[in-house]
Amino acid sequence: MSGTRIHPTAIVHPHARLGADVVIGAYTMVGEHVEIGDRTEVGPHVVVEGHTRIGCENRIFQFASIGAAPQDKKYAGEPTRLEIGDRNVIREFCTFNRGTTQDAGVTRLGDDNWIMAYVHLAHDCQVGNRAIFANNAQLAGHTHVGDWVILGGFTAVHQFVRIGAHSMTALGTILLQDLPPYVMASGNTAEPHGINSEGLKRRGFAPEAVAAIRRAYKTLYKSGLKLDEARAAIAESAQTQPELRILADFLAEPGRGIVR
């Protein structure tokens, strides 16, 4: 615990494992089965509990609830987990719950995510890397979110929904079905509105790759093809256009149906 600073009003269980240069703020509580990695800062009035592992260089702001029991009536106290990666920013009043035995038993947040205030990650959610969740984005249980996803404020996601990499939602979007990679959506319930072309350009996608993704979007949404036909056409295109592989793989997996 070299360089670790714990405010005298904080309550840290003696069995909690803290890395080097960890900061624990005033009136924060850290439970027995918690592990916090090097250089992570936990602000004041935070509760970190359960079997929770937090990686390195995270910053957790005040009043967050990290690792609480899942909001699932079937939960019977099993030692399920929450795992948070590295370099995440988690703002005020976020609530991240542990997993359940009805799924993999773990809720995960990857690396380099920017999570704004009042975001809820329910039990068994799996979130990738470099996502941005605006204020009050709410994920129900078993939701899977890919890399580079942007969720607008007050986005609400139904349980078991999948959200593909590089996709984006607008303010107040209600997702009851899966959102494919690259697609922008808005509305209650969500409807597709093109691809996240500006985001792709900022991430270094070549113009040819963006054009291929736009053509695939038109195949899926504008061609008049049935879903199975569009899926097959995109899978064929993905054989020569690698940027379409994640879209083809996403469409090949079973789910709740897609926003369409």
Image (cartoon, rainbow, N blue to C red):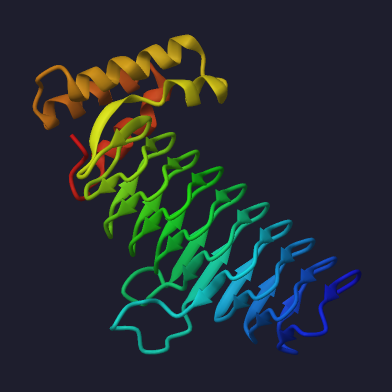
* Residue found at x 29% / y 83%: 73
Side (left or right) of 43 relative to 2: left
| Residue 134 as seen in the image, left or right of residue 58 | left
- Which residue is found at the position 40% from the left and 76% from the top? 70
Residue depicted at 31% across the width and 53% down the height: 157
Q: Nearer the viewer, residue 213 or 186?
A: 186
> Which image quarter holds the C terminus?
top left
Q: Name the quadrant of the N terminus.
A: bottom right
Q: Quadrant of residue 172?
A: top left
Q: Is residue 72 left or right of residue 230?
A: right
Quarter of the image for residue 44 reads bottom right
- Most extreme residue toward the right is 3
Q: Quadrant of residue 19?
A: bottom right
Q: Position of residue 124 (x, y in %)?
A: 40, 66
Residue drawn at the location 56% of the way across and 25% of the way down: 203
Name the spot of residue 226 as percent of width and height, x first.
8, 27
Q: Is residue 235 above or below residue 146?
A: above
At which x and y percent is residue 147? 49, 41
Q: Is residue 198 left or right of residue 203?
A: left
Is 214 above or below relative to 226? above
Q: Position of residue 63 (x, y in %)?
A: 59, 71
